[in-house]
Image: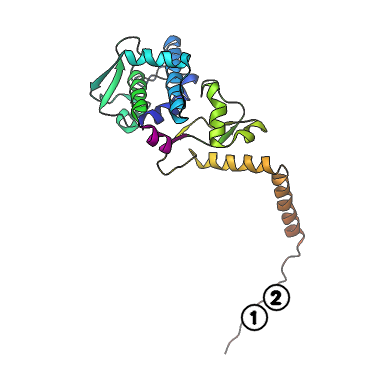
Amino acid sequence: MLWVDVLNRALEWPTGAVHPQGGSRLEAVAGERLSRDAQVLRSVCAARLLASELAPDEAKPVSQWLATVTLNAENRGSELGDEPASELGMPQFVARRRSGSLVEPFESLLSTSLLQLLSIPSAWLQTAARRCHGVRPGPAATEAWPGAWEARFAAHAGIERMLATADLHQCPRVVWSERGGRFCSKACSNAAFAADKARRDPRYFAEKQERYRARRRRVDRAPPPKNRGAFVYID
């Protein structure tokens, strides 16, 4: 899904989005606009994934955005990074705003993603898409999910207690899996398992390390195997 790829890639844009044609960084004003529009798209995603309504201050920019969108039956193959838009799942109809738009290809990517996200039936969306249930160390980046949604996502993933007892935050990536996958990677799955274990049994990992060291001590102290020699039998 295009909107999933765009939202996941947008997590890296606050550090300095690079224009795919020429590799130059976007000017400050263009970069701020890109981050703001990405946050609008993320708010819409949060509301749809959690079957909720946008707050008035979140709904207003969405309405303004949609009011200026036009559809074009074309796919010019614009690029984001080194990957053609077609590889990002760009649909045949590309959306762009008539005025106040971003530089390309970001305008086509975000506007098309917004329409694609809004057009997916709720039952299908909430079955196949979710925010990753994994955890990462440290506080969440301010450019990721709007703070008002963080607690609700944690409750939806069943990790609110885990986050309350450790310096962790929920992985910000979106997962699209019609089979019900909850994690964006094996690393996120392992981190969530370890954090949950540590919360339920604070001594678990310390005791596991002690058992490992005890086994190593036994191996180190064990006498070397006796050399019984060798013999050759000839008939």
Secondary structure at badge 1 equals: loop
Residue 111 within the magenta-colored segment of the rendering: no
Mark 2 surroundings: few (<14), some (14-19) or many (≥20) residues within 10 A? few
Q: Residue furthest left?
A: 73
124 or 188, nearer to the observer = 124
- Identify which residue is drawn at 37% across, 12% down: 64
- Kindly tell me whether residue 214 is visible in this rendering: yes
Q: Which residue is mark 1?
A: 231
Way the structure is coloured:
rainbow
Q: Is residue 221 left or right of residue 38?
A: right
Distance in Å between CA atoms under marks 1 and 2: 9 Å
Which residue lies at the image location 36% right of the left edge and 26% below the top edge? 118
Residues drawn in magenta: 121-130
- Say which of 231 and 57 sits in front: 57
205 or 227: nearer the eye? 205
Q: Relative to 208, does residue 20 appear above or below in the rendering?
A: above
Residue 81: % across, % down: 38, 26
Q: Amino acid at mark 2?
A: Arg
Q: Which residue is mark 2?
A: 228
Q: Position of residue 12 (x, y in %)?
A: 47, 24
Question: Is residue 221 shown above or below 181?
Answer: below
Q: Secondary structure at mark 2?
A: loop
Q: Residues within 10 Å of mark 1 (few under 14, many from 20)?
A: few
